[in-house]
Image (cartoon, rainbow, N blue to C red):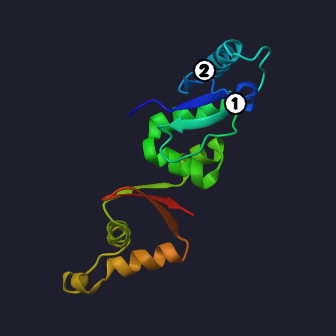
Amino acid sequence: MNTPCVYVACLASYNNGILHGSWIDCANDPEDIETDIQKMLKASPIEMAEEWQIHDFEYFCGFDPSGYPPEKLSQFALFIEEHDILGAELLDIHGDIDKAKEVLEDNYLGCYESLSDYAEELTSGCYDIPRCLEYYIDYDSMAQDMELNGEFYSIQTEHDEHHLFIN
């Protein structure tokens, strides 16, 4: 996976019709990100430039890091590097790094090829299903009802990767 990064632009330059900025690797310490931002501002064609803004980003897997300070950018990037698309989706759903980490640690049920696989595993783990009844159980409908009833929610990261979480 590629490293999450942002394009930070100098607002003084931008407001004067000049495009000046740099790509910054966010999977670093917040101090390193801040240092890179200050270097970019110092190199600005507009004297005493102070303000910056994120104008673009890459490899955040759909999560928009715009408007966040270096400390949060670092946390988001490291979380996404560790958990890939699943991490980005959790950040997008919960909007908070601490909540995303908590949900991943406390509410994660696992990864399944389909939602019906989870329903089947849950059912067979709780009950001894007689062999003569096995083919009458509709695990697809059971899983759909469980999700609609709010018993869990899922994040699909690949065609056959459904990550399930307790609601």
Residue 19: image quadrant is top right
Taking the image as shown, residue 119 lies to the left or right of residue 71, namely: left
Q: Is residue 44 above or below residue 5?
A: above
Q: Residue at x 51, y 48 (%)?
A: 62
- In the foreground, 124 or 135: 135
Marker disc for residue 36: none
- In the foreground, 10 or 3: 10
Percent of width and height locating residue 166: 53, 61
- At label 2, the amino acid type is Asp
Q: What separation in Å lies between label 2 and label 1 (alpha carbons)? A: 32 Å
Q: Is residue 150 above or below residue 28?
A: below
Report whether residue 74 is seen.
no
If you read the primary sequence from the N terminus, does the residue marked by circle 2 or circle 1 appear first?
1
Taking the image as shown, residue 55 lies to the left or right of residue 81, namely: right
Q: On the image, numbered disc 1 is attached to which residue? A: 17
Q: Quadrant of the N terminus?
A: top left
Report whether residue 50 is seen.
yes
Percent of width and height locating residue 129: 28, 79
Q: Residue at x 51, y 64 (%)?
A: 153
Q: Quadrant of the C terminus?
A: bottom right
Taking the image as shown, residue 140 lies to the left or right of residue 64, namely: left
**Label 1 Cα neighbours within 10 Å, binned few <14 / some 14-19 / many ≥20:** few
**Label 2 Cα neighbours within 10 Å, binned few <14 / some 14-19 / many ≥20:** some
Percent of width and height locating residue 128: 30, 76
- In the foreground, 142 or 8: 8
Q: Is residue 90 above or below residue 118?
A: above
Q: On the image, numbered disc 2 is attached to which residue? A: 29
Circle 2 SS class: loop
- Tally of numbered discs: 2
Percent of width and height locating residue 10: 69, 25
- At label 1, the amino acid type is Gly
- In the foreground, 14 or 68: 14
